[in-house]
Image: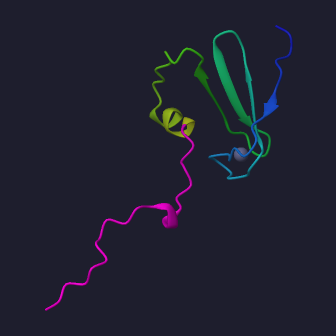
Amino acid sequence: MSNPVKRFIAGAVCPRCGEMDKLRMYRDETREYRECVSCDFSDSMALDGSDMPSQELETRVNRVPEPVDPEAKPLLFKPNPVKK
Ligand SMILES: [Zn+2]
C-alpha cells in the first residue's frame, strides 16, 4: 500500500499524554487510525462503525470527553430561598 495521508486533528487532545494537536489520523479502506506524535498512543476504529473491539479501553478512548464548563451547566436547584 502507498503511504496513507496523515492529517493532524485540530484541537484533538491525546488521551494518553494530554497534548493538544499531536494526534494524527489516517485511514485505509476499512479503518480509521489515530496516533499521537508526542507519545506512542494509537488506536483505530472501523469506518462503517461495525467495529466491536474486545478491549473496552479502546472503545473508551475513542470518545473525546466534552469539556465541562460549570457556567454552561443548567442548575437544578431553585434560587428561591425557603422562608422559615
Ligand atoms: Zn500522546
Quadrant (top left/top right/bottom left/bottom right) for the N terminus:
top right
Residue beneath the point at 45% across and 25% down: 54
- View extreme (left): residue: 84
Residue 78 left/right relative to 68: left
Residue beneath the point at 45% across and 61% down: 73
Q: Quadrant of residue 3?
A: top right
- Pinpoint residue 11: horizontal percent, then vertical percent: 72, 46
Residue 16 left/right relative to 83: right
**Nearer to the camera, 71 or 10:** 71
| Number of numbered discs visible in the structure rendering | 0
Residue range of the region highlighted in magenta in the rendering = 63-84
Give the vertical position of 28 relative to 38 (above or below).
Answer: above
**Nearer to the camera, 60 or 77:** 77
Q: Is residue 38 part of the magenta span, yes or no?
A: no
Residue beneath the point at 49% across and 66% down: 70
Quadrant (top left/top right/bottom left/bottom right) for the C terminus:
bottom left
Give the prevailing secondary structure in the magenta stretch.
loop
- Pinpoint residue 31: horizontal percent, then vertical percent: 64, 17
Give the vertical position of 20 relative to 81 (above or below).
Answer: above
Give the vertical position of 24 relative to 77 (above or below).
Answer: above
Q: Quadrant of residue 47?
A: top right
Q: Which color scheme did the rendering employ for the protein? A: rainbow
- View extreme (bottom): residue: 84
**Nearer to the camera, 69 or 21:** 69
Give the vertical position of 1 relative to 61 (above or below).
Answer: above
Residue beneath the point at 53% across and 33% down: 58
- View extreme (right): residue: 2
Q: Is residue 79 part of the magenta span, yes or no?
A: yes
Residue 48 left/right relative to 81: right
- Pinpoint residue 22: horizontal percent, then vertical percent: 78, 44
